Image (cartoon, rainbow, N blue to C red):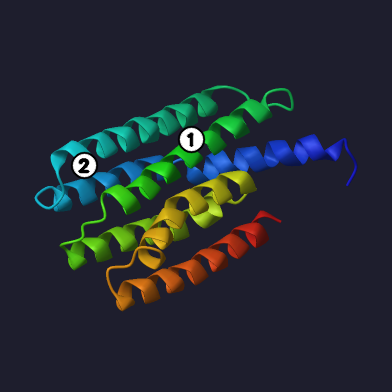
Amino acid sequence: MSSSTEPNLAVARTEALYRRSEIWPAATFITAGFFAYVAKGSIAAEVLLPWLLSITVISLSQLILSWFYDRLSLSEDNYKIWRNSAVVGWLMIGVCWGVAAIMLFPDQSTSLQALLILLIIGLAFGLIRPLSPVLPAALCFLVTSTGPLIYNLTIQPESGLQENIGHLLAFILLVMLLTAIRTAR
């Protein structure tokens, strides 16, 4: 590939990232709100509310970024700013979900554990295609959201079942990473 087409391809990938992922920050916020609502009696408010506030602020920031992106022009001169802003935003949303996997993982409630696992893995699966045009965005979100969950289940398991689920999720993460890499081509 010649160097003159590389910026055009990068601009097109950045454009695809914003077009494909524009509703997903709202989905992460709504999903977080749903989990907080369901978990409010089982997880201390001192832990749950700061997490919810963090993911809300970051998700709203991503939505505002998408709003500005729709109104401003993308060019070979400024696409790196837009691309890098999106990558950082998705990294931060992934970190919030990774924090949930460690800090909000309710030891006393297997049903809330299952719900949190389903929400994190569901978001990760759902975001593979929208984030894959800019591979670092996909990799950042996938690793930071699911990595701590896998760590929590495999390194600090409460039971053999949790450890087995952790190993299965590690395999699923590998599949998601390979899918993101393949989709990015």
At x 13% / y 47%, what residue is drawn?
Answer: 40
| Corner quadrant of residue 122 | bottom left
At x 56% / y 50%, what residue is drawn?
Answer: 138
* Res 89 label: 1
Between the C-alphas of marks 2 and 1, the distance is 21 Å
Residue 45 or 130: which is nearer the viewer?
45
* Res 48 label: 2
From the viewer's perspective, tell me whether residue 21 is left or right of residue 57. Answer: right
Q: Position of residue 35 (x, y in %)?
A: 23, 51
Residue 33 or 1: which is nearer the viewer?
33
At x 48% / y 31%, what residue is drawn?
Answer: 66
Q: Amino acid at mark 1?
A: Gly
Label 1, secondary structure: give it. Answer: helix
Q: Amino acid at mark 2?
A: Leu
From the viewer's perspective, tell me whether residue 51 is left or right of residue 77. Answer: left
Q: First in sequence: mark 2 or mark 1? A: 2
Neighbour class for label 2 at 10 Å: few (<14), some, many (≥20)? some
| Corner quadrant of residue 26 | top left
- Which residue is farthest left? 41
In this view of the protein, can residue 107 be seen by the observer?
yes
Q: Position of residue 34 (x, y in %)?
A: 22, 49
The C terminus lies in which quarter of the figure?
bottom right
At x 16% / y 49%, what residue is drawn?
Answer: 43
Q: Position of residue 25 (x, y in %)?
A: 40, 40
